[in-house]
Image (tube, helix red, strand yellow):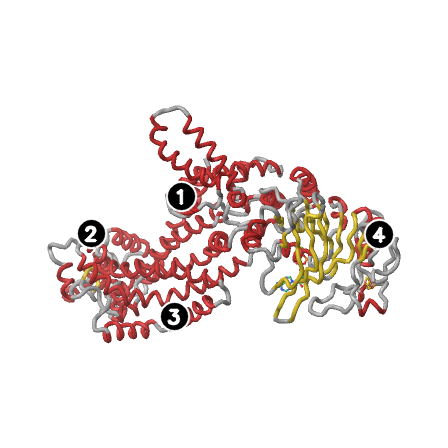
Amino acid sequence: MQLWGFALEFRAYIIRRLALVVPVLFGVSLLVFALLQMFSPVERAALYVTDPKQFANITEIIEKYGLNDPLWVQYGNWISQIFHGNLGWSKVVSLPVTDAILNFLPATLELAIFATPLIILGGIFLGSKAAAHKDKAVDHITRAGAIMGWSLPTFWLGLMLLMIFYGFFSGLFPPERLSTAMNIVVHSEAFTQYTGLHFLDAILNGNWQVLGDSLRHLFLPVITLTVVQLAFIMRLMRSSMLESLGKGYILTARAKGLDENTVVSKHARRNALIPVLTIAGYIFALLVNGVVITETIFNYKGLGWWAWQSAIHLDIPSVLAFALFNGILFVLTNLVVDLLYAKIDPRVRLGGQAA
Amino acid sequence: MNELLKIRGLTVRFYTYEGVVQALEDVNLDINRKETFGLVGETGCGKTLTALSILRLVFAPGQIESGSIYFNVDNGNEPVDLLTISEDQIRAIRGSKISMVFQEPGAALNPVYTIGDQISEVILLHRRQEVAQKALRTVNKLLAGKKGFISLLAKPVWLMERGLYQRIAQNPRAEGPRIVSRILLVRGLLWRLKGESIKMTIDLLKEVEIPDPARVARQHPHQLSGGMKQRGVIAMALACSPKLLIADEPTTSLDVTIQAQILQLLNQLKSEFESSILYITHDLGVAAEICDRVGVMYSGSLCEIAPVDEIYANPLHPYTKALLAAVPKPGVEPHAIGGIVPDPLALPSGCRFHPRCPSATEICREHIPTMGELAPGHFVACHNCQGETGGSSR
Ligand SMILES: Nc1ncnc2c1ncn2[C@@H]1O[C@H](COP(=O)(O)OP(=O)(O)O)[C@@H](O)[C@H]1O
Ligand code: SF4
Ligand SMILES: [Mg+2]
C-alpha cells in the first residue's frame, strides 16, 4: 500500500518532468541552428564537403542540401539530417562527425566514470566530516586541503604529477590512453571492443594486461580532475551541512536521544545533500563534456581534445555538433538531478505547500 | 520524596565575541510528580535555555558553568544528577524519561522523513525490547500456523527472524542483531521491527487525536497543518511515556483556536500518561489554564514561585505584578511593563529588575536578592517584599 502510493506520486512527477524535456531539447536545437545561420550558404555547404575537390561544385551542394531555402525548410532538413546521424564532416580527424563523437566519447566517459564518484562521494564524505567536527583538526586539515586543491591550476598540477610519476618514477603512470603494445592488442582481431571503454572491454575480454595498462594510464588524469573538483563539492557540502546542523529538527533528533552519528548521517546529511546535488550534476556534465586542459596535458584523446582541435582549426561542423551534444547532455543531466531531488526531498516530489 | 526534578544553582553562560552572556544565573526550582509547572517570563529571559539544560543540550558557545539537576525517576532510588552522568546515560534519558515539545513544530520536524518514520525512530530506540517482543509474537504465530507450501519455503527465514528478535527481546543492545542491522540486505531480516513500531506510532497518533492516523503516518511534515504537526511532535514526545514532558511554548506559533485544542490535549494526556509537565510560556493567562504551580523568570533567574491561584490572587514580586497587569483582561486596559529587558551583555548590578522596578531602593542596586519562602509554598526573591511571615528574605 505504502510503496504503491509512493510510486504513484513519484510517477506523476516523473511524467511531468519528462514532458518538459521535449520543449527544452527543441529550444537547444533552435539555438544551435541559429548559430549555424550566422554563416553564409557557402560556408555552411562546407559542412558536407569531405574532399577539397568538391569545392568546384559548391553550388550543387548548396542546391542539394537546400541551403538557400526558407529558414523553416532548412531547419526541417537540418533536423532530419541529424536524425539520420549526419552531422557533417570533421576535417580535423577526417571522419564523419557522428563517428568522431562515438570515437572520442568512450575515452572521456572512462575518465568521468572514475573521477565522478571519487569527486562526489569523496567531497560529500569529507565535507560532512569537516562540518561535524567544525573547528577541530579534521576540519582545519580538510579545509586547508580544499583551498589548496581549488587554487591549484589544473595544468600546473597535471604537469607536476607527470613530472613526478612519469619522469621521476620513470613511466609509473604514463600519459595517453594505452601503451603502444596494448594499443595493438586492443585493435587486434582477438580483442572485441564492446564499448570502447578500454578498462571495461578488457574485463569483458578477460584480458588483465590491458586492464592494468588502461588503469595505469587513467590514474594521473583522474587524480588531477579529482583534486581540483573535489575541493569544490567538499566546501559546498561543509557549508550546507553546517546550515543543516543548526536547524530545529537536529535539536529534535538530539532530544530524542539519538547518538551523534545518527544525528549527523541520518538527519543532517540528507537535507544537506539537496543543494550539493545540483553542483554534482553540473560537474558530471562537465566531465563527460571532455576536460580540455586535462586531456591535452596527458595527451589523452577524448571529446575535450577533439573539440579543442576542431575549434583551433575552424572546423565548423564539429564545433556545432559539439555544442549540440553539450546541450543535450546538460538537459539530460538536469533531468537526472531533478529526479534525484524528488527522491531526496518530498517537497519536490509531492509538489507545493499542501496543508 | 515528591520532587521529580530539582534544579539547584544552575548557571549557564555564552562566550560570544561581544562578551560573556550570563544567560542563566543561579536557577533553582523543583518540579513535583504529576504536576504541571509553568515557567513564565518575557522572551529572552532564559526559559528555553533552562529546558535545554535539563536535557543537557546546551552547545558552544554556551556552557553550563555550575549547578545540579537532580532527576528522581522512581521513588526510592537515588536521584541522578543529569549534569554529571555519562553521555550514554543522558542519551538513554532523552526522549524516553524526559522529552521535549518545541515552539515551532514546522522547524522541529525533519522535512525529508515521514511523520511515521520520525516517531517510530524514538520507539525503535527506547522501546526496542517491546517492539522485538511484538515481532516475536507475530513470527511465532506464523511458525505455528498452517503448514503449506509457502510456509515450508519461508520457514528458514522465520526461524532466523525468531532468533534475532529473541536476542533483542532479551537485550536490546545485543551485538548479533546490531551487526545484522548494519549489513545491507541481511538487515531486511529485521523488517518486522519497523512494521511493529509503525503500528505503535499509529496508536500514538490516535492518542493525540489526529484524524486518519494511518495516512498521516505516511505523510511528510509539509503536507500537514501547523496544529497537526504539533500534535505529531507531542505524539513523538509521549512515545515512551516520559516522566517529564517539557513543552516550550507549544502553542505560540499556532492559531488561537488550535492553541486551545492543544492546551486541552496536553491537560488530558498528562493525567493519562501520569507525566509531569514543564510548561513554558510568556503568557500568564495560558499558564493559569493549565499549570498547578508557576515560576516567574526574569533575566536568567527565577523571581517568584507559587501555586497558580496564589500567584494570581497574591502576587508579591514587583515583576510578577507588572506581568499580571500586562495580561489583557476584558474591560481593563493592559499596562505594558515600563523600560526594556536588560542587555544580557551588560546586566544591571544587584537585582536585575531594579532599573524597571517601581519599588526599588538603595539595597536593590547593590545586592542580589535571594529566594525566601514568604508564605507556605510561595517563594519570592526580592528585598522589599512582605509576605505573611514578613520581612525581607535576607
Ligand atoms: N547562541 C547564543 N549565543 C549567545 N547568547 C545566547 C545564545 N542562545 C541563547 N542566548 C542567551 O540566552 C538567553 C535566553 O534565551 P532563551 O532561553 O532562548 O530565552 P526564552 O526561551 O526565555 O525566550 C537569551 O537572552 C540570550 O542572551
Ligand atoms: S529587589 Fe528591589 S528592585 Fe528587585 S524586585 Fe525587589 S524591590 Fe524591585
Ligand atoms: Mg524560548
Q: Position of residue B75 (x, y in %)?
A: 67, 44
- Residue A268 is left or right of residue A296, and the answer is right
Decide: marks 3, 2 in contact (CB < 8 A)? no
Q: Where is residue B136 in the image (x, y as percent from the top left)?
A: 46, 34
Kindly report which numbered mark, 1 or 4, lies closer to the viewer in this rendering. Answer: 4
Badge 3 sits on which subunit? A
Question: Nearest the camera: A184 or B52?
Answer: B52
Residue at disc 3, CB closer than 8 Å to ligand 1:
no
* CA distance for labels 3 and 1: 39 Å
Disc 1 element? helix
- Looking at the picture, do discs 3 and 1 lie on one chain? no
* CA distance for labels 3 and 2: 35 Å
Question: Nearest the camera: A98 or B174?
Answer: B174
Instruction: Report ligand 2 position as a quadrant.
Output: bottom right
- Looking at the picture, do discs 3 and 2 lie on one chain? yes
Quarter of the figure with residue B16: bottom right
The residue beneath circle 2 is A204
Q: Position of residue B110 (x, y in %)?
A: 53, 50
Disc 2 element? helix
**Label of residue B187 in the image:** 1
